[in-house]
Image: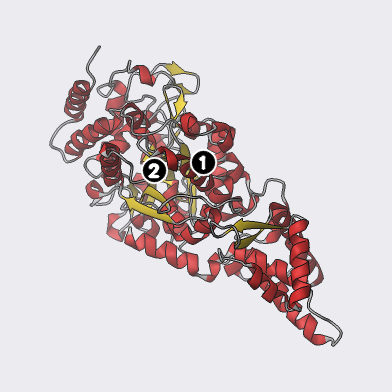
Amino acid sequence: MNAMRGHIESYLVSPKAKTKMLHTLSFLENFGVELESSVELFVPNPLFRMTLHLIRGHLEAKTVTPTSLIGASQVPYATANRRLKEMVSSGLIEQRPRTQSGKSFSLHPSERLLEQWMQFSGRVERLAEAEFGGRERASDTKDYYYGGSYLSAQSIPPLKVLPEPLKVSGGIRVLVHGDPTFMVMDNLKRQFEQVIGAEIHQRAFSIDRLREEAIRNAERKISRYDIIALDLPWVGGYAESGMLMPLDEAMDVARIDPADFHTAGWQAVHWGGRPYGVPGQTTPELLFYRKDLFAEAGLEPPATTDMLLEAAKTLHDPARNRYGIAWNAARGTALGHTVLMAMADFGEPVLDLPAIAGGFKMDDLANRDYRPTIDTEAGLKAAEYLLEMFKYSPPDILSMSWYERIRPYAAGSISMAYGYTLLAPYFELDDSSPAYGQTGYLPHPAGSSAGPIAPVGGYVMGIPANLPPERVKAAVEALLVFTSPEAQKLYVQNGSRTNPRYSVGADPEVRRTSPIFEAVDGMSWRDELQFWPRPPVPEICDIIQICGEEFHDMLRGITSPREALKTAQARADALIKPD
């Protein structure tokens, strides 16, 4: 995790992370200086210079005051002050109070000014390319936002500051998972603080510790957090335990534009017909595979589990320190997730859910009318599949979990790996990785006639039920900012590979960032994104733990597949008492 944090942070401060929009600003600033100094009669254009200063301050999350804006104009105070008032009265500048007295303001570009600037900067780029031969810009400025990309109707503009700063004692307090997407959010904290007008205090934990902290927080009389993140399968347990405030109780749900979220991701935040949070990241587990190695071996991308096993066998070469495939096989939570997803590959969920077109019915889970279905034919096929994969896995596979399975893939010693899209920065942001630019993205190969699926993972952001009423409004506004299309696009441009919204996946700048987004959008439209492999019932964490323990013993050779299935079934049955 520390290595990943260091990689992301270095990426954020490197030239690659400089936005193309700032690149345009720098060009125009330098061009203005050259122009004004080349001919004696040329004088500074105050509106132009003030606009440049205002846009730069917005993008770099720096406070712009009337004094600093007047100073940037390079004209006499009285002239600059008149131009400032003109920009305010014409709706190009928005003023936000900095103090309770309302006598001091910070200045921000209005939505109208941002739109005009984006169109202008796009024209500048096209004109320069047309006049000077369209020479390629340096590779370290590619694939980040530049004004021209915003000309598309599908483009999402930069984050806009709230009209009024959030008034909340001590700032906004957030509990999150310590993954790359939330790390990006933390690294952009200064910019988000400018947007909401309040400090942000973020605590990050590993998956198991995150759940433990949320449970402790629910036991407190008053929540320590305004917003908490939770893994998708925990929604039912959190709702049943009264840990989360129903979203429709805290806000007008229409404000988040539910139709913009991937269908599976939005459905997964519901319990008993009510939403309990907003998808903060939707990250399906996919099969990552080395396109170059497959091409050299004459292999087709695996569409079935049999094809995957054949490819893993062909590419498995321990003598050359190369192994066929890596996956979550560490005892407990990690392997438990793999078991549930392997069962789904063979067409069955871990509970007796009613089958419907395109998957399984999840609407009635709150009625608690379900039973575990582990010791089944699909369960046996899944167990045998894991044993076969085990043959073509690295020697330390039984200790591999979320990050451990991706690191060796990024290093080049693994030919395939099951992994969530949020882990793709390990090789997509490192041009020294053998997998850089050579990775293909597929849904889980199918073990049944039902076809391939991509089990949906990710995190929901919700409001604790024990949050004091006077903090709820501010928490809602912050939640809307953190999960907005503008914020999601910003996460992507700074290294995230998760996205819960259709609009963000359709953004041309986002699509240029990584092939993952187009691939996942395609899976969503084909109805391959599914959250039924990990149904969000209150008992799901214990069921996952049980499977992770019993199947680990099976992989170690202590028990047979049928013994593992039988024991796991009995333990899971004991969790759910019949009515």
Q: Is the residue 130 above or below the residue 563 in the image?
A: below
The residue depicted at 30 percent of the width and 59 percent of the height is 321
Q: Position of residue 470 (x, y in %)?
A: 44, 41
Q: Which residue is mark 1?
A: 500
Q: Residue at x 66, y 68 (%)?
A: 66
Say above or below: 193 vs 262: below
In the displayed orientation, state which residue is furthest to the front: 101
Residue 348 appears left or right of 106: left
Q: Is residue 301 visible?
A: no
CA–CA distance in space, label 1 to label 2: 14 Å
> Residue 103, located in which quarter of the rendered image?
bottom right
Q: Is residue 159 something that shows in the picture?
A: yes
Q: Quadrant of the C terminus?
A: top left
Circle 2 residues within 10 Å: few <14, some 14–19, many ≥20: many
Q: Which residue is mark 2?
A: 229
Between residues 1 and 120, which one lies in front from this camera angle? 120
Q: Position of residue 304 (x, y in %)?
A: 43, 34
